[in-house]
Image (cartoon, rainbow, N blue to C red):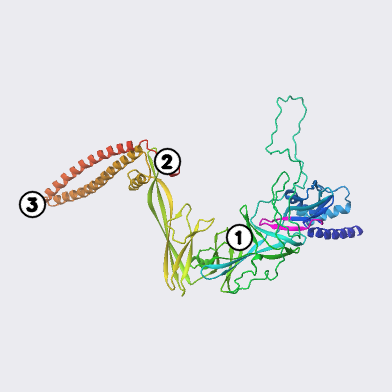
Amino acid sequence: MRVLGTRCLLLSLFLTLGSACASSAQVSSSKLPVRRVVIYRNGVAYFERAGEVEANQVQFRLRQENIGDFLATLAVMERGGHRVRTASFPVNMDEENRDEHDSALSEALDSWDGKKKDSRQMRTVTLELDGKHHELTVGYLAETPLWRPSYRLLVGDKGEATLQAWGIVQNQSGEDWENVELALVAGAPIAFESTLGDPVIPQRPIITDAGEVISGVPEGSSSYRQDESEEDGAVEPIEMQEEGRGKSSKPRSFSRKKAARSYSGASPMSADAEMMAPPRLNKETAMAPREESHLARVETQTGASRYEIPYRVSIPDKSATMVLLVSKKVPGEAVFLFAPDGGVADSARHPFRVARFKNESGGILERGPIAVFEKGAFLGQGLVESLAVDAEATVPFALIRSLSITSDRTRDQRGARLYSVKDGVLTVERDEAVITEYSATNGAAERARVLVRHEIMSGARIWQPKKGTRELAGENTVLVPVEVPAYGKASLLVEERRPIRRRMDWQSPQARNAIRDFIKTQKLTESKLAAFEAILEHTDKLSTLADRERGLHREQRELEKSTRETRLSLRAIEKNGQAAKLRRELTKRLGKGTQRLETITKELIEIRLARTEQEVRLKEARMGLKIAPPDRRR
């Protein structure tokens, strides 16, 4: 019973200590407080700790799970000319002095949290100094909840709206952020978990001495650039803004081995409590901040947008805050969008009410919710997808049943273009045309401007797009506008074309038209031009002969039918003595028909001979003719 009671007591104590460890800071340092936090959209944040130190070392307390990220991204910036010597850290635990109770507690921990065993135990990383005065800034990455955007859009008159963007920041670092510079980055640079803190001994090949003779010595090589003028491990000083003195510093480069980095500090400014309050929705304020200086400074770096908060903020541990990033007039309007959605059954016939605006904030807008207001009234909520600078967003927030839209689709083939000629084979490119007709009926007393979301078939393009047509970024889709009068109807035609290539007979009308257009639009050599002209001459003659042959065959069939009927009539009245006159007329008609059939037979023979001759000449004309596809003609 005593042993069991002792184990239960120790287990309770261990769980309490485990909870304390879990709530400890990811990274902490008593001598270097957090001064700057840059939060990204990929689950990490860049931290800067800064302060004046006059000691032999600076220690950082880290959770075991954070050592890899800390060592992989550690950057030390120093002002004053002194140097950081080394950064040391433990790589294993002392396993030799654990007693029975330690083993029991370890087993209990394994069953309690097997996946996170030892992940939150604390470790110490030590920066060795030289005991002199240092002004240090230490930067590193650590896991942090990603910041999330939230938007407001107040739709005004004459195509103008007010766009407001807020950033929601959560502090789960295990320590308070007191009076720190804060920046939010709309982008996600590549980041990964590192295990640099874990010792790794790779397997090595085993070499046995059996008296082998090595005939050659392998030579080593390196692709790294070596600069012998630098001292190994040297850290160059950097000018930094002095805390509390209001001095602005000139950015300089800092490196270990000249790894470039620039430093810039935001001027201190106290937070305005009134600015952080929810916006008042009325025509006078239009959600505008009281001071423009409270808005974030927007910078674009390597394709990502950085929102620098111009005042220092304090965020206690295990809490969140909202900061105003953008509040700006932008082009915007509330219109209708016909975009059938499988999740909304009625959207197959009725359009959505949507807000459209252009991102003129100067920075990228990340994906997030948006609340839409008009004339001080809440209209609805939507979701903004990631929006590049100067791109346009269309956000549905309601379904309108006073408008009804139907569609009908037909297919056809248009045009003919010579694509290529090779080995006597002619390839012609035609357009497969798909025509979609949208019919809109407006049952409201106000004129409606509708944007029709039209998905383009793969490989196609919109033919002669209507004015105002917009292509959606990253999608094979366009928005086509149509105006529907009050209590009226309107139609919209959208034609899309897709090229199709087929081998075609030289004598077909499409092939001859394609050759004629090709001669007119292309600069050809004299030999190719002469070949094409000869081909057109022979194909035209063959076309004439074919037309004549078809006409003779048609006449031949009619005459054969007529003579067969005449013979049957003669047989019917052969013994009728009163039908002598009729027999003479039928006999005369039969003779003329027979004579004409003989003439047709001769003409058909002559046409076949002429066709054979023209086909031979056509084959000779196209022999050796070669035309490359359009992308190879240049």
Q: What residue type is labelled 1?
A: Leu
369 on left or right of 333: right
Which residue is labeled 3 in the image? Answer: 580
In the image, which residues are magenta? 30-47
- Could you tell which of marks 3 and 2 lies nearer the N-terminus? 3
- Residue 619 inside the magenta-drawn segment: no
Residue 29 percent coordinates (x, y): 80, 56
Query: Closer to the camera, 169 or 66?
Result: 169
The mark found on residue 365 in the picture is 1
Do the residues bearing badges 3 and 1 touch, measured as CB atoms within 8 Å? no
Q: The C terminus is located in which quarter?
A: top left
504 on left or right of 91: left
Q: What residue type is labelled 3?
A: Ala
- Could you tell which of marks 1 and 2 lies nearer the N-terminus? 1
What is the distance, in whole Å, between disc 1 and disc 2 at their CAs? 46 Å
Front disc: 3 or 2: 2
Which residue is labeled 2 in the image? Answer: 628
Query: Which element type, helix, strand or loop, lies under badge 2?
Result: loop
